[in-house]
Image (cartoon, helix red, strand yellow):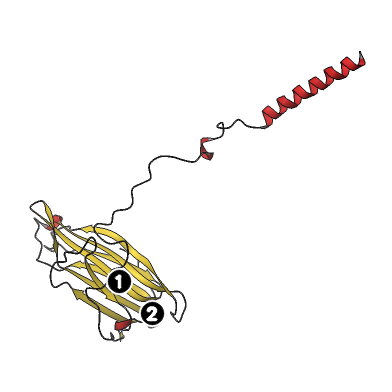
Amino acid sequence: MARHSRIFVACVIAAVGLHGSAIAEPVKGSGSTAERPKTGPKPPPPPTYGLCELPQNPDSFPSSPVTVEQDQCSWFQRYSAKSMTPTTGGSCGGFTVVFGQTGDLKPHLNRVNLKAEWDDEPLTAKNCVSASIAAVGWGERCSDDACTSVSWEKIGGPTLTKGTWQSTKQSCYFYSQFISIDKKYRTLNLDIIATLVEDGKPVRKRAKGTIHVKRGNGKCPTVDQKPR
């Protein structure tokens, strides 16, 4: 009888143990949906508007040192260039303006403004909305104060800015602009595509690029610029 009792108790304990294990160990696939890896199509990559995914070789650059000038509030350097003909580009890219070591770009002038503008035939109220500027800005950023180590990074873009007619001024003035503050660069690169839709097809036009760097001279209060 005692032997039968011990067998019965052992069976009960084993059954309870199995039941406890079933409770303690969750069934696969029963977890919260938040813990499951999400599947499905990946979001599409951001548009490039015909611009390249890496900085391009220059169409225009200063071949001699650009003088450091001073205005009321800052020391600055400025390089501006216009495309002589509409850029046809290759598989990507447009009119590329570069300001770097050959122009003696000063990395300590660390308030950077890259501006892309229309520089072709004057636009009218009729075709202004059909004009656009695509642009992207790059910088070869210094990793140390001496700028002995650098790496390329995107400052802004790609962006696409479409023309808006200003009736009060009777003009179609529009541009793309990228601003960086408190970063040192050894080289700056601005790639621009100006386009006008004609007979339903985009036609490339001439563009203008300006690279302006500055640093406060201590004579004026500092007001941070904001990207447009």
**Circles 2, 1 touching at the beta carbon (< 8 Å):** no
Residue on which disc 2 sits: 107
SS under mark 2: loop
Between 55 and 192, the residue placed more toward the observer is 55
Find residue 62 and report its image quarter: bottom left
Residue on which disc 1 sits: 189
Earlier along the polypeptide chain: callout 2 or callout 1?
2
Quadrant location, the C terminus: bottom left
Residue drawn at the location 67% of the way across and 28% of the way down: 23
The relative height of residue 225 versus residue 106 in the rendered view (above or below) is: above
Q: Amino acid at mark 1?
A: Asn
Residue drawn at the location 9% of the way across and 60% of the way down: 124
SS under mark 1: strand
Between 58 and 191, the residue placed more toward the observer is 58
Find residue 152 and report its image quarter: bottom left
Residue 120: x and y in percent read 12, 67
Q: How far separated are the C-alphas under marks 2 and 1?
A: 14 Å
Between 68 and 83, the residue placed more toward the observer is 83
The local crowd at label 2, few if under 14, some if 14 to 19, many if 20 or more residues have their Cα within 10 Å, is many
Residue drawn at the location 84% of the way across and 18% of the way down: 7
